Image: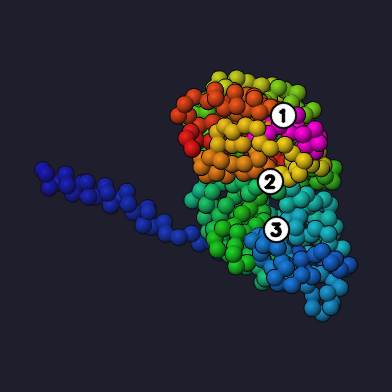
Amino acid sequence: MLKRCLQIVVLVTAVAAAPLRAQGLPDFTQLVERNAPAVVNITARKNAADDNDPSQLSEEEVPDVFRRFFGDPRQFQDPRRGGGERVSGGSGFIISADGYLMTNHHVVDGADEVTVRLKDRREFKAKVIGSDQQSDVALLKIEASGLTAATLGDSSKLKPGQWVVAIGSPYNLDFSVTAGIVSAVGRNLGDDQRYVPFIQNDAAINRGNSGGPLFNLDGQVVGINSQIFSNTGGSIGLSFAIPIDYANKVVAQLRTKGKVARGYLGVGLQEVTADLQKTLGLSRVTGALVREVSPNTPAAKAGLKESDVIVSVDGQKIERSGDLPPIIGATAPGTQVTLGIVRDGKPMTVPLVVGELPADLTAGGVSAANPGAEPAKGDALGLAVRELTADEREQSGIDDGVLVENVTGSSARRVGLRPGDVVIMVGRKRVSTVAEFKAAASAVPKGEAAMLLIRRGGNNSFIALPAGD
């Protein structure tokens, strides 16, 4: 009887394991054959030479950011033109049979002439219907018949570990196919493109793949290949694509209005860290910490304050500071939303009407050098501070704060505080005089970190200053 039971167990285990052994690696041939005709090669030409253009620089003068994302842009200079014409290349894909295409903004930015080449080798001059720098999405139109349009998928369903396939023209090698997996979703790549929740994947993407489609195994476009991180200019397995759901919203506005209107709160954000969690009264590390509220903005009108932590928008959770800009940016201006926040350790909700992102945002700064300043008058928390002069307040555009003249404590030095910083808040108390600074510092419970709101270079940020010296 025991022997029979063991045989059954072995048989069941073998049956359960069989699908895994039989599955193997996917075969992409049918996917590629079906979808390659929707992929295009794009050549962009700009006639007038620009002394500030990276294609005119020596190798040593090429900014690191161009190598990091796009490699050396000097590759696109046409040697036959003696530097008078710049030629750049990229990829794209057809989204409708009447000739509309998607690609990257940086592929066609500033171009005087854009040429689209199809898989059947036909070439057409393209019209740029609209192009959006913040999202790096552009919409083109060609007049052609017999076009194959790609099927657009649902990028919200992507999960790390799923297979993806890229088709494009790396180094002008048309219709090259690479494959990999989704490494992560919702990646935030910094302020320049804070509204895009990028798809990270490890499909080989190189110069010329920009603007090309990223497919799932159903042959649906789930992303637009946009950027790579690289110290060589070539693929090292860190590729980033714009989610097609996000790109569709951008294209809809480009097609109807020629530009993109984004939602706007008027806050500066930073990450909640383990050091800041306790001082903010949070049960865990989560949310987007408000480090600055600009005056006369939707956030200011709704009553948001520095040190508030935004944890949800209309019930959608905000786990990291990078989660908030894509949600607000995709919200139509004039829409009322409900923010879930934590203030002084207490959960609450704040109704807010989303504004429209201004075309140009600037921030004032405080100069660290002031020859006429009086010597430091206070020393607390390992910081020697003094009050701001009237000129400094006018230059910085802030009414509160004391200027750090010297960093005397080792803890303050370790967390990066330095002369020229302006301390706006200690804990949840705003300070504008040395006396207020010292009083707020003395109110910090013994053995606990002090939370400071610091202004540096026109930007605010919270710093947790550990107890001790």
Q: Report which residue position mark 3 lands on.
A: 211
Whether residue 450 is in magenta: the answer is no
Q: Nearer the viewer, residue 336 or 438?
A: 438
Whether residue 392 is in magenta: the answer is yes
Spatial CA span between label 1 and label 2: 26 Å
Would you say 436 lies left or right of 106 here? left
Residue at 53% across / 40% down in the picture? 409
Residue 175 seen anywhere in this rendered image of the structure: no
Q: Nearer the viewer, residue 446 or 211?
A: 446
Would you say 311 lies left or right of 266 here? left
Q: Nearer the viewer, residue 410 or 133?
A: 410
Nearer the camera: disc 1 or disc 3: 1
Residue at 63% across / 49% down in the picture? 189
- Name the residue at the front extreme: 375
In the depicted structure, whether residue 154 falls above or below residue 314: below
Spatial CA span between label 1 and label 3: 46 Å
